[in-house]
Image (cartoon, grey):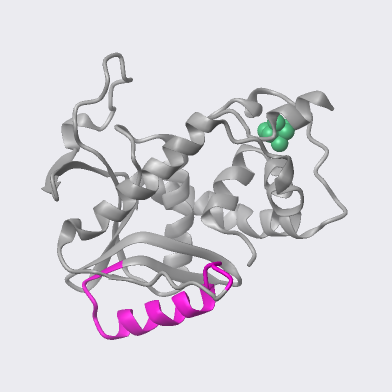
């Protein structure tokens, strides 16, 4: 695989992070509270799949437990051709660059793309993720009508930063959960352009085993979130 949506978001934060993910992932240290949040995010994502009614999920595993990307691409293609209304983990590939959309929902002649996040408000890295997906889906010929975030719609903890999209959000209830839908189509479109400019360059960085990017520690080590290679790079 060339660049995935995770690679793209992490590579924009720091090219060395992308390279380490590909060649020395054993150096990362994921703090337990972050791991707990990631695990909770998986449960949230599973619950969100049914929010628009019946759906088909393409997730397919190989015998060794790893994702079978080729099978997921095939399944997605067949589901699109048969006019399936809601596809979860809809997989697409363009020149080896790959993404699996959390939810792809058919609306009329087009599709709405949803990225599911177990958090209370939109953040730039989520929009970056969606912008990358927009590029891959549109290059695969999917007519995209909108790009949206599907977030937690319950009351955030006290002192949680204000949601800049509050006045335009929609809310939905499903399975005892309250969800918030934030339309970030315009912002994701802007990122799509950046993605089209950077994706092949990031792919080359990821691929070249002998060429770790020579990047000094700096602001990017903590923004937008603390890097999991922080200890490794700061020890250096
Ligand atoms: S700690 Fe900083 S320099 Fe090292 S990979 Fe992470 S972001 Fe890049």
Total count of labels: 0
Is residue 12 toward the left or the right of residue 59 in the image? right
The residue drawn where x is 26% and y is 15% is 158
Which percent across, then down, holds residue 210? 88, 54
Range of the magenta residues? 64-87
Which percent across, then down, holds residue 214? 83, 38
Q: Does residue 20 belong to the magenta stretch?
A: no
Which percent across, then down, holds residue 88? 32, 65
Is residue 178 toward the left or the right of residue 81 in the image? left
Which residue is nearer to you in this view: 231 or 172? 231
State the residue lying farthest toward the top.
159
The residue drawn where x is 64% and y is 64% is 2
Q: Is residue 74 above or below residue 91?
A: below
User: Which of the 4 image quarters holds residue 38?
Assistant: top left
Q: Is residue 20 above or below residue 113?
A: above
- Which image quadrant shows ligand 1? top right
Q: Which quarter shows the C terminus?
A: top right
Q: Is residue 78 above or below residue 179?
A: below
Confirm whether residue 232 shows in the render: yes
Is residue 4 toward the left or the right of residue 149 in the image? right
User: Which of the 4 image quarters holds residue 84?
Assistant: bottom left
The residue drawn where x is 77% and y is 30% is 233
Q: Does residue 80 belong to the magenta stretch?
A: yes
Which percent across, then down, holds residue 145? 27, 61
Which residue is nearer to you in this view: 122 or 45? 45
Q: Which quarter shows the N terminus?
A: bottom right
């Amino acid at each position: 695989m060339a660049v995935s949506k995770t690679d793209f978001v992490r590579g924009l934060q720091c090219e060395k992070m992308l390279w380490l993910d590909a060649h020395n992932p054993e150096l990362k240290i994921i703090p337990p509270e972050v791991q707990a949040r990631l695990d909770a995010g998986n449960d949230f994502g599973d619950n969100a799949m049914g929010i628009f009614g019946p759906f088909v999920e393409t997730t397919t595993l190989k015998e060794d437990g790893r994702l079978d990307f080729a099978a997921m691409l095939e399944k997605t293609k067949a589901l699109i051709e048969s006019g399936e209304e809601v596809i979860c983990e809809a997989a697409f590939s363009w020149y080896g660059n790959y993404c699996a959309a959390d939810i792809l929902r058919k609306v009329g002649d087009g599709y709405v793309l949803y990225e599911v996040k177990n958090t209370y408000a939109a953040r730039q890295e989520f929009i970056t993720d969606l912008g990358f997906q927009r590029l891959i889906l549109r290059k695969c010929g999917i007519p995209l009508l909108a790009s949206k975030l599907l977030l937690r719609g319950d009351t955030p903890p006290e002192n949680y930063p204000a949601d800049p999209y509050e006045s335009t959000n929609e809310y939905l209830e499903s399975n005892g959960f309250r969800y918030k839908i934030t339309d970030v189509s315009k912002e994701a479109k802007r990122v799509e352009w950046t993605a089209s400019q950077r994706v092949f360059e990031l792919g080359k960085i990821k691929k070249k085993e002998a060429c770790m990017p020579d990047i000094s520690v700096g602001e990017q080590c903590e923004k937008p979130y603390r890097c999991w290679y922080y200890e490794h790079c700061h020890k250096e």
